[in-house]
Image (tube, rainbow, N blue to C red):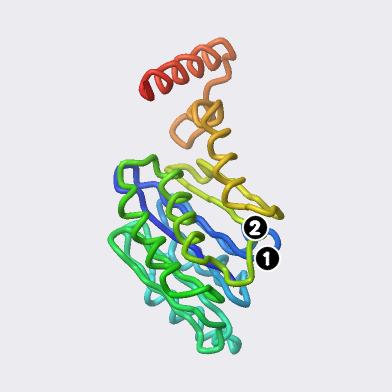
Amino acid sequence: MTWSIIARDAATGEIGIAVATRFFAVGARVPYVAAGVGGIATQALVNPYYGIDGLKLLRAGRTPCDIVETLIAADAGHQSRQVHVMDAGGRVAAFTGNQCVDWCGHIKGDGFSIAGNMLAAGRVLDDTANAYIAGANLPFAQRLITAMRAGEAAGGDKRGRQSAALLIHGDEEWSALDLRVDDHPDPLAELERLEQVSRERWVHFRKYLPTRSHPAGITDREIIDAGIDASIEAATAGRK
């Protein structure tokens, strides 16, 4: 009932998942990402433990293929599931059960994996992939959303639209970006708007948060405000 893309940004090492569906709050159950480890999307008749247990297996150093085999072997309902996995090195594995609703399937490319079910046609995934490849010069978050918008233009979820989400992790355990549109008539358009809002201050502010290498982060508000203003000014100048 969903399609999603998992990708690794070659420039930064960030791992992100974008997803859309005709179902409520897709961001609450489909995407799972862990910093420096990888990402998992569990779809169709969702099994949240594919994401929970799959990340544990990724942390333990298991390969995506081994993880998919392990997850479906433990689940008597696996033929009604869809799952795809990418590790931090960009290796991919996927499974689409034979009871998933057509159109359903998965494809992969250099640094990305795309899977979907209950779609209007197979070209939803193809157009998502082509747009992702063509968007190599875009910032990572915008590249993922642009890819999903192309898939939607190809028909998307054949039942319609309701929710979408974008989850990106960088070096830290906390997310670099976590956006959810849980119930909206045009969820990908709203996701795109929220990503634009995130660039107003959040993407400039997050570098001052605590990190493992700098546990206190920056707490001097004058330094933070001056740094944000400088980053905004630089970003504005770069767009001119």
Q: Which of 240 and 19 is in front in this view?
A: 240
Circle 1 residue: 23
Query: As drawn, is 115 to the left or to the right of 81?
Result: left
**Which amino acid, by three-letter code, is at mark 1?**
Phe
How many residues crowd mark 1 within 10 Å: few (<14), some (14–19), many (20+)? some
Residue 22 appears at what percent x and percent y?
65, 65
Residue 112 appears at what percent x and percent y?
36, 60
Can residue 113 be seen in this snapshot?
A: yes
Q: Which of 64 and 60 is in front in this view?
A: 64
Q: Is residue 54 above or below residue 178?
A: below
Residue 190 appears at what percent x and percent y?
61, 45
Q: What secondary structure is found at the residue carrying circle 2?
A: strand
Q: Are marks 2 and 1 in contact (CB under 8 Å)?
A: yes
Total labels: the figure holds 2
Please identify the quarter of the rendering in which residue 158 is found: bottom right
At horizontal 53% and vertical 75% (from top left) the residue drawn is: 117
Give the numbered dot on residue 163: 2
At horizontal 65% and vertical 57% (from top left) the residue drawn is: 163
Q: Quadrant of the C terminus?
A: top left
Can residue 215 be seen in this snapshot?
A: no
**Which amino acid, by three-letter code, is at mark 2?**
Ser
Give the numbered dot on residue 125: none
Query: As drawn, is 176 to the left or to the right of 130?
Result: right
At horizontal 43% and vertical 59% (from top left) the residue drawn is: 6
Q: Which of 107 and 14 is in front in this view?
A: 107
Distance between the alpha carbons at the discs numbered 2 and 1: 6 Å
At horizontal 57% and vertical 68% (from top left) the residue drawn is: 157
Q: What secondary structure is found at the residue carrying circle 1?
A: loop
How many residues crowd mark 2 within 10 Å: few (<14), some (14–19), many (20+)? many
